Amino acid sequence: MQKTKKIVLAIAGSSGSIYAQRLIAKLSAFENIEVGIIMSDNAKINWEIEIGPFEKKEVPFKIYDKKDFYAPFASGSAGYKYMVVIPCSMGVLGRIAHGVSDDLMSRSADVILKERRKLILVSRETPLSLIHIENMKLVTLAGGIILPAIPSFYSKPTTIEEAVDTVVDRVIDHLDLDHNTYRWGEDL
């Protein structure tokens, strides 16, 4: 019997709601995964601006309040092995880099790092200041993965969704999930 893979999915308040939307859609196709979602207030605003109304009933995973410190992944004993912040604002990245656990999102990231589990931050900001770069360095030194929302084009995407999926599919790779996606060197 395959063990359930537990994933925290945090949606922070930078532009790029489509990345989170596509990841949720793709994760919903997998069996034996448990996903807990956290959204910042700004994430909800950006989702509405960029995609339209956020409909909780359309999300197949449990959504936790940003102040719910009783959520299972607020503790390392719950066994959540992965966390993705997508998109990840520089403010959230900075709080994570400096261990500021003032909400469920930053607390969960702190737990993932202290337990030496996999934290994936899909940063979405440009240009970067030295402060941003230093914070990325701190997260990397702590064991986190900075996976910028920078699409690749060697698979010749023809839609926005296909370009977004070049990033989302890399996230899924880092979640150690088997899936079909374009791989470098394959014929198109």
Image: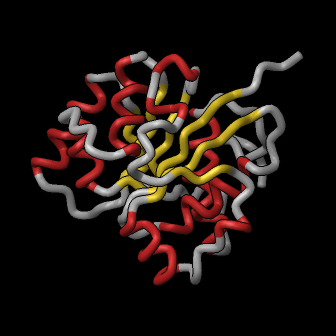
The reply, left or right, for residue 96 in relation to residue 57 is left
Give the percent coordinates (x, y) of residue 149: 44, 56
- The relative height of residue 98 versus residue 28 in the rendered view (above or below) is above
In the picture, the quarter occupied by the N terminus is top right
- The relative height of residue 164 versus residue 34 in the rendered view (above or below) is below
Give the percent coordinates (x, y) of residue 167: 55, 52
Residue at 40 percent of width and 58 percent of height: 12
The reply, left or right, for residue 179 in relation to residue 41 is right
Residue 177: image quadrant is top right
- Identify which residue, 162 or 95, lies in the foreground: 95
Query: Which residue, as the protein is rendered here, is positioned at the far left?
Result: 130
Residue at 77 percent of width and 55 percent of height: 188
Q: Is residue 150 visible?
A: no
The reply, left or right, for residue 2 in relation to residue 175 is right
- Identify which residue, 183 or 38, lies in the foreground: 38
- Identify which residue, 36 or 124, lies in the foreground: 36
